[in-house]
Image (cartoon, coloured by chain):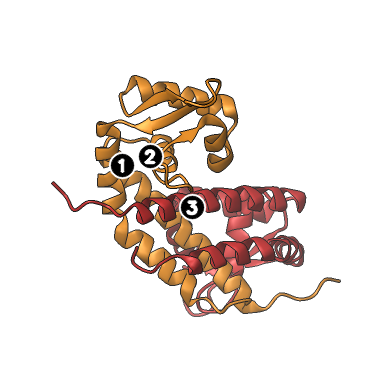
Chain colours: A red, B orange
Amino acid sequence: MERPIDPEVYRQAAELRGSLRRFMRRSEEVAARHGLTPQRHLLLLMVKGAPDGGERASVGDLAERMQLAQNTVTDLVARAEAASLIARERDLRDGRVVHVRLTAEGERRLAATVGALEEDRAALTALVRSFTPGA
Amino acid sequence: MERPIDPEVYRQAAELRGSLRRFMRRSEEVAARHGLTPQRHLLLLMVKGAPDGGERASVGDLAERMQLAQNTVTDLVARAEAASLIARERDLRDGRVVHVRLTAEGERRLAATVGALEEDRAALTALVRSFTPGA
C-alpha cells in the first residue's frame, strides 16, 4: 500500500491541468489569428527564445526542446522556410551544422502572438505561484 | 508598430512551453503504465480534484474544466464507467443532475499515477516560480 495522497494534491493537480488546457487552447486561437498553426507557433518561439539568447537553433536542439522526432522537425522547418517565416544558415565554425533564424515576417507574427498572450501567461504563472509548495 | 517584446519574455515563454511538453509527455507515459489513457487520466483527476473538495463532478462541470464538448465527456464517462473506473449517481436534490465518482479501482490507478508524477509537478512549478514576474 502506497502512502495516501493529500486531497489538496489532487485539487491542485486538477487545477493545474485545467489551466494548462485553457492556456493551450487560447494559445492556439491567438496563433491562428496571426496565421500560425500550433506547431509553427511553437517552432518560431523555440527558435526566438533559444536558451543561450542567440535567437537561433539547430534542428537537433529543436527536436529535444519540442519533444518531436528530428524528421518531424526537419519537415516543419522546411515548410516554415517555404512560407518565409524562417531562414536557414550554416554554422561558420562547423559547416555540417545548420541553424534556423526567424525572418522579419516570422518575427512579426510571433511578436503579435506572444504579445497577445501576455495576460494568459501571467494568469497561468500566478496560479502556479499560488499553490502550496510541496502539496 | 506594437511595443517591442523583451528577449527575456521569449526565453521564458519558450522554456515554459518546452517544460509543459515534457510534463505532458511524462504524464502520458506514467498514466499508460497504470492503464490510463491521457483522457481517462484527465477525467479521473478532474473528478477526484473537484474544486469544492466533494470528489465528484457533473458532466457539465467536467466539459468546462476539461475544455471538451459535453458529448465527448458523456462518451468518455460512459466508457470509463464500463471499465469500472467511475460510477454515476443522481443528485439527491435535483434528479436531473448526474454526478460522477471514482470507483476503488479508479482511485487506485489515479493515486498511483498522481503519486508517480510528484517530482514532475514539483519541477514544473519550481520553473514557473523562478520566472521574473511580469517579464
Residue at mark 1 to residue at mark 2: CA–CA distance: 7 Å
**Nearer the N terminus, badge 1 or badge 2?**
2
Q: Is residue B19 visible?
A: yes
Q: Where is residue A34 in the image (x, y as percent from the top left)?
A: 76, 53
Q: How crowded is mark 2: few (under 14 residues within 10 Å), some or many (20 or more)?
A: many
- Which of these two is toward me, B2 or B110? B110
Tell me the tag on residue B41: 2
Q: Label 2 sits on what residue type?
A: His
Chain letter of the residue carrying label 2: B
User: Are tags 2 and 3 found on a single chain?
Assistant: no
Instruction: Name the residue carrying label 1.
Output: B110
Instruction: Name the residue carrying label 3.
Output: A15
Image: B5 above or below B90 = below
Secondary element under disc 2, as helix, strand or loop, is helix
- Seen as rendered, the residue at the extreme front is B93
User: Are tags 1 and 3 found on a single chain?
Assistant: no
Q: Label 1 sits on what residue type?
A: Leu
Residue A61 is left or right of residue B114, and the answer is right
Q: Residue at x 54, y 42 (%)?
A: B65
Chain letter of the residue carrying label 1: B
Q: Position of residue B122 (x, y in %)?
A: 36, 65
- Which of these two is toward me, B59 or B72? B59
Image marks 1 and 2: residues in contact by CB distance under 8 Å? yes
- Within the image, what quadrant is residue B69 found in? top right
- Within the image, what quadrant is residue A103 found in? bottom right
Chain letter of the residue carrying label 3: A
Q: Residues within 10 Å of mark 1 (few under 14, many from 20)?
A: many
Q: Where is residue B21 in the image (x, y as percent from the top left)?
A: 46, 55
Q: Label 3 sits on what residue type?
A: Glu
